[in-house]
C-alpha cells in the first residue's frame, strides 16, 4: 500500500502545482487585461495633455495649456509621494469654482480647473485601470484594494436599500392612518357640510424622511452601478432657453467666469489663439453653433458622440445654461486672409 500512497500524494501535489500555476496565469492575464485597458484609455483621454510616456512637453496640447502645467508622470521622485487614491481623486472629482477661496483651501480637493474630471465619462473601474497605467509610467504598480472597494459599495447599497424600505413602510403606514382619520372625520359630516367640504392636503413628516433616505438610496445605487458601468449616456432633453435681454447679459458673464474658473474649457479650446488645441477654437461659436445643441453637448457630449475626447464635466443645468449664453456671444469676425506675398 505504501508506494500507492506515494503515487497518490505525488499526483495530488502535481495537481496542486498545476492549479497554482494556472491560477497565477489567470491572475496575471486578468492583470494584463486591466493594464491594457488602462493604457488604451489613457492614450485616448489623457495623452494629449500628459504625453503618452507621461513626460512633460510630450503631448500635442502641452505648449497650449494654461499654467499650471502637469507634473512629470514618468518621474518616480515626483509621483511616488502620491497614493493610488490621491491620483484617483484627481481624475474622479466634481469640478468646483477655483476662484472660491474655500475651494482653494480645501486640502482634499485638487483645485485645478484645466485638469478635467472623468467621473461622468468613465466607470470607476476604468479610472482605476487608468491609475494602474499611470503607476507603470513611473515604475510602480497599483496596490489599491479594488475588490474591497466593490464590496464596500455593495454593502453601502444594501444598507441604504434596507433603510429606504423601512422609511417607505413607515411613510405608507402613516399615510394610511391619516387617510383613515380623514375618512372617519368625513363620516361625522352632514350631507350639506360635505358639499362644501375641501379635504386638506395631508402633509406628513414621514414623507420628508422617506424622500431624504430615498435620495441616499438612489445615490448608493448609482455609485454601485457606476463602479463597473459608465454613467448613463441618455441625450439631454431640449432646454427652453428664452430669457430676458438683461438676464442674458448677466448669464453670459457668469458663463465666461465658469468657462475658465470652474470647468477649464480653455485647457482644451482656444479663443483668439490662446488656449488648448484638443477641441476646435470657439471664437465663432455664436455664429456656427445652435444654442440648444451647445447646451445638450456641454451636459453630455458622450450622448451625442460616444468616443469624443471631451469629457462630461458634470455641469449642472444652471451652469450649462450660463455657458451656453456665453458661447452665443462669441462672434469674432472672420479672420482676414493675409495678403499673399508677391511671387
Ligand atoms: C486638458 C488637459 C488635461 C487632460 C485631458 C488631462 N489632464 Fe491631468 N492634469 C492637467 C493639468 C493642467 C494638471 C494640473 C497640474 C498641476 O497643477 O500640478 C493635471 C494634473 C494631473 C495629475 C496630478 C499630477 C499633477 O500634475 O499635478 C494627474 C495624476 C493627472 N492629471 C492625471 C490625468 C489622467 C489620468 C488623465 C486622463 C484620464 C488626465 N490627467 C487628463 C491637464 C490634463
Ligand atoms: C479635455 C478636453 C476638453 C474640455 C475640457 C472641453 N472640451 Fe469641448 N471639445 C473637446 C473636443 C475634443 C471637441 C471636439 C468634439 C469631437 O468631435 O469629438 C469639443 C467640442 C466642443 C464643442 C463643439 C465645437 C464645434 O465647433 O463643433 C463645444 C461647443 C465645446 N466643446 C464646448 C466646451 C465647453 C463649454 C467646455 C467647458 C465646459 C469644454 N468644451 C471643455 C474637448 C474638450
Image: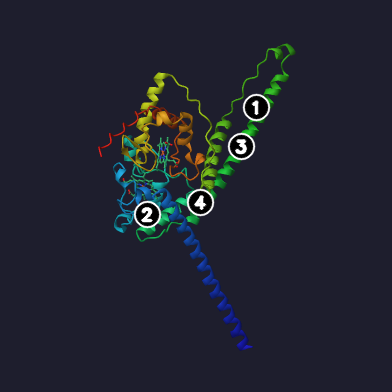
Locate ligand 2 by image quadrant: top left
* Foreground label between 3 and 4: 4
The type of colouring in the image is rainbow
73 on left or right of 207: left
Which secondary structure lies at badge 3?
helix
Gap between marks 2 and 3 measured at Cα: 51 Å
The N terminus is located in which quarter?
bottom right
State which quadrant residue 262 falls in: top left
The answer as to whether callout 2 falls within 8 Å of ligand 1 is: no
Gap between marks 4 and 1 measured at Cα: 39 Å
For residue 203, the mark is none
**Crowd rating for badge 3 (residues with CA inside 10 Å; few <14, some 14–19, many 20+):** some
* Foreground label between 4 and 2: 2
278 on left or right of 197: left
Residue receiving disc 4: 152
Answer with mark 4 or mark 1, whichever residue precedes in sequence. Answer: 4
Residue receiving disc 3: 168
| Residue 75 to residue 182: above or below | below
Amino acid at each position: 500500500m505504501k508506494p500507492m500512497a506515494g503515487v497518490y500524494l505525488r499526483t495530488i501535489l502535481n495537481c496542486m502545482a498545476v492549479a497554482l500555476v494556472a491560477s497565477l496565469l489567470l491572475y496575471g492575464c486578468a492583470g494584463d487585461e486591466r493594464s491594457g485597458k488602462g493604457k488604451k484609455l489613457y492614450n485616448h483621454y489623457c495623452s494629449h495633455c500628459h504625453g503618452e510616456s507621461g513626460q512633460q512637453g510630450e503631448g500635442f496640447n502641452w505648449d497650449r495649456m494654461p499654467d499650471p502645467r502637469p507634473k512629470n508622470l514618468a518621474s518616480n521622485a515626483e509621483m511616488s509621494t502620491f497614493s493610488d487614491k490621491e491620483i484617483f481623486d484627481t481624475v474622479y472629482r466634481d469640478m468646483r469654482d477655483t476662484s472660491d477661496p474655500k475651494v482653494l483651501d480645501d486640502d482634499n480637493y485638487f483645485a485645478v480647473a484645466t485638469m478635467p474630471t472623468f467621473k461622468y465619462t468613465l466607470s470607476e473601474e476604468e479610472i482605476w485601470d487608468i491609475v494602474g497605467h499611470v503607476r507603470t509610467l513611473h515604475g510602480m504598480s497599483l496596490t489599491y484594494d479594488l475588490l474591497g472597494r466593490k464590496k464596500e459599495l455593495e454593502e453601502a447599497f444594501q444598507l441604504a436599500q434596507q433603510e429606504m424600505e423601512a422609511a417607505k413602510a413607515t411613510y405608507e403606514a402613516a399615510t394610511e392612518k391619516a387617510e383613515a382619520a380623514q375618512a372617519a372625520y368625513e363620516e361625522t359630516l352632514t350631507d350639506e357640510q360635505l358639499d362644501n367640504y375641501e379635504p386638506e392636503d395631508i402633509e406628513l413628516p414621514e414623507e420628508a424622511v422617506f424622500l431624504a433616505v430615498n435620495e441616499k438610496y438612489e445615490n448608493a445605487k448609482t455609485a454601485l452601478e457606476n463602479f463597473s458601468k459608465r454613467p448613463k449616456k441618455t441625450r439631454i432633453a431640449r432646454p427652453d432657453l428664452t430669457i430676458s435681454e438683461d438676464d442674458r447679459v448677466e448669464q453670459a458673464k457668469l458663463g465666461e467666469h465658469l468657462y475658465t474658473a470652474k470647468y477649464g474649457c480653455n485647457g482644451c479650446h482656444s479663443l483668439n489663439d490662446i488656449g488648448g488645441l484638443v477641441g476646435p477654437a470657439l471664437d465663432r461659436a455664436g455664429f456656427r453653433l445652435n444654442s440648444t445643441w451647445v447646451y445638450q453637448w456641454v451636459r453630455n457630449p458622450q450622448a451625442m458622440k460616444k468616443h469624443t475626447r471631451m469629457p462630461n464635466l458634470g455641469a449642472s443645468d444652471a451652469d450649462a445654461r450660463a455657458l451656453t449664453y456665453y458661447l452665443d456671444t462669441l462672434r469674432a469676425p472672420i479672420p482676414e486672409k493675409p495678403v499673399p506675398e508677391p511671387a
